[in-house]
Image (cartoon, rainbow, N blue to C red):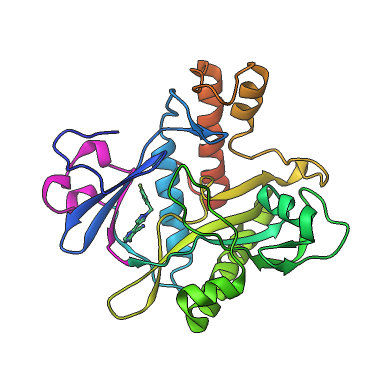
Amino acid sequence: MTIPGLPTPVHSGKVRELYDAGDGLLVMVASDRMSAFDVVLPTAIPDKGRVLTALSLWWFDQLSDLVPNHVVSADVDEYPGVFRGRDELRGRSVLVRRLAMVPVECVARAYLSGSGTKQYRVDGAVCGVPLPAGLTEGSELPDTIFTPTTKATPPDHDAPMTYAEVEAAVGPEQAAELRKLTIEILDRGRRVCGPRGIILADTKVEWGVDAAGTLVLADEVLTPDSSRFWPAEEWQPGRAQPSYDKQPLRDWLESSGWDKKAPGPELPPEIVAATRERYVAAYERITGERFA
Ligand SMILES: N#Cc1c(N)ncnc1-c1cnn(Cc2cccc(F)c2)c1
């Protein structure tokens, strides 16, 4: 999503952009683009970027007693230079502090799923963390575990890291802090979501270090793009769990005959509307606030 008058993004992801705003500041922008099965679809989901930005900001605030974060402002009228007052950014962007990013994708898991299940079926462990026998896709784990990966550059995929590899990468002290805080963030998220009928199965967070050497929570936090949200009433270990936010889209894509190696198909209006509604419902159920 190129916005006229803005510089070329310093990072451009599947659904987000990151701009240099000068003076040690960045502007993180969440688009309405939707990806599924690792493919960016041609049809946007209205308000997706605004919902996920609002949810991430809500979680940063909820976690502010536990960890400092990189947020400077979410008010476009306070942004510097060419970013100030830009309506294309309103509600879908955050002005953040530029940090020295930790070279580890910090993942915590409370349930076994996806790549974790694949690893478990090979050697009974995930990222070197041994697990009890008899677990299956969707099983709740006895404890929340830290299952970090590398930060691969597409088209390469993130690779599992053992805790010893994290220690080698960042040192034992920071590795211990990353594990402890990443697990605590998932556990806190679960305590909020559980009573609201949502299983928060896992999450990926990104950390940076500021000029004082302090670990700072960065990127987005506890959103459906960085985490697995499952409707609790449909939880059934032994099969892939329905995604709270993406299931209507996944079901339609599976039934449409789309070849996943081909470009994504245009989405029918009713699937766009259902997907938007799922994102809005997730925000309202988790935060207890109306999405405006
Ligand atoms: N957050 C943050 C951050 C920070 N506060 N300081 C320095 N670098 C980053 C940073 C670098 N890559 N990303 C991932 C990313 C996010 C959003 C859009 C994208 F395209 C890519 C984040």
Q: Quadrant of residue 256?
A: top right
Q: Is residue 180 above or below residue 205?
A: below
Q: Quadrant of residue 248?
A: top right
Is residue 89 inside the magenta stretch? yes
Tell whether 74 sits left or right of 275: left
In the displayed structure image, the side of residue 259 where residue 41 appears, left or right? left
Q: Pick the residue in front: 106 or 279.
A: 106
Residue in view at x 79 percent, y 61 percent: 124
Image coordinates of residue 223 in percent, x first then y, are 51, 49
Closest to the observer: 173 or 248? 173
Residue 100: in magenta span: no
Q: Is residue 104 above or below residue 195?
A: below
Q: Quadrant of the N terminus?
A: top left
Which image quadrant: the C terminus?
A: top left
Q: Residue at x 71, y 68 (%)?
A: 129
Quadrant assignment for ligand 1:
bottom left
The magenta-colored residue range is: 75-99
Q: Which is more toward the observer, 269 or 226? A: 226
Residue 16 rendering spot, x and y as whole percentages: 37, 42
Q: In which quarter of the view is residue 231 placed?
A: top right
Q: Residue at x 55, y 18 (%)?
A: 270
190 up-or-down from 289: above or below = below
Q: Residue furthest left?
A: 81
Count how many numbered circles sit on residues in the image: 0
View extreme (bottom): residue: 173
Residue positioned 42% across, 39% down in the render = 14
